[in-house]
Image (spheres, grey):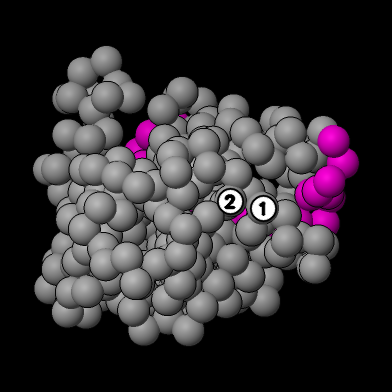
Amino acid sequence: MRIIVCENYEEVSKKAAQMILSQVTLKPNSVLGLATGSTPVGMYKNLIQMNKERYIDFSEVKTFNLDEYYNLPRTNEESYYHFMYENLFNHININSENVNIPNGMAEDIEAECARYDEAIKESGGIDIQVLGIGNNAHIRFNEPTVNFEKGTHLVELDESTIQANSRFFDDIDDVPKKAITMGVGAIFKSKKIMLLACGENKAEAIYNTVYGKVIPEVPASILQFHNDTIIILDKAAAKLLKKEDYKTA
């Protein structure tokens, strides 16, 4: 596990984009695991600019998103399908057939989850998986629980996650209570994992991820066992870490 601490959110976003640039430059048909939420937006803005300036080419890239709300139409502005097209896909030269996002409206959710896992497997696996982290150390919608889920599955969202996501909706009652998400096991299979975190409210989750016991109550702690994980933080998110355990950007 490597940890890089940047001055602020803008520097975190640039560093993360540079990591994606390096990956796609070395392997033009890379398989990228992508995340939603406010944290990766800056990275996406940097990638859009790089694409416009022809530093990065997405024409052969394939993507898999971590999750999607359950029973929320893709036309809804708060769906992650809509988020990804608004914040990235509409602005780069990616083939829409290479974009993969779970279908939260599928009639048979178990079949959709199995199909999604098989699609990742058939693609050769994810080369680099982008992650955020919740205040409760969830990685996407893998909430603190009594066991690590292996594959893509339907999950009940934790109350703290619902509260955090309510800022995107007009009313907290409109926030979906369930989502389809890649399991921790599926995330762990990624060849490289890049976790991004900013803000003092993430400091405790980062501390527990780096130093805590590897337990499903702290989902991100499983990353201690991954052989190629890089954590990119701003100073606020890194405030509880020992200085000898990270490098500064």
Residue type, numbered disc 1: Gln
Residue found at the far right of this picture: 54
Residue 149 appears in the picture as rendered: no
**Does the magenta-highlighted stretch encompass residue 119?**
no
Q: Position of residue 212 (x, y in %)?
A: 18, 74
In the depicted view, which residue is nearer to us: 119 or 197? 197
Marks 2 and 1, how far apart at CA? 5 Å
Q: Residue at x 17, y 62 (%)?
A: 144
Residue 62: quadrant of the picture? bottom right
The residue type indicated by label 2 comes to Lys
Quarter in which the N terminus is drawn: bottom left
Q: Please check the rendered image and state whether residue 67 is part of the magenta-colored stretch, yes or no.
A: yes
Q: Residue at x 87, y 41 (%)?
A: 54
Q: Which residue is mark 1?
A: 18
Residue in front for this viewpoint, 127 or 207: 207
Residue annotated with mark 2: 15
Labelled pair 2, 1 in contact (Cβ < 8 Å): yes
Q: Quadrant of residue 244?
A: bottom left
Tell me the magenta residue range: 53-73
Q: Which mark is residue 153?
A: none
As helix, strand or loop, the secondary structure at mark 2 comes to: helix
Near-viewer residue (122 or 30): 30
SS at badge 1: helix
Q: Residue furthest front?
A: 244
Question: Which residue corresponds to the image point at 18% horizontal and 24% vertical from the top-left?
Answer: 172
Q: Is residue 163 visible?
A: yes
192 relative to 83, above or below: below
Q: Position of residue 180 (x, y in %)?
A: 37, 53
Packing grade of label 1 (10 A; few <14, some 14-19, many >=20) is some
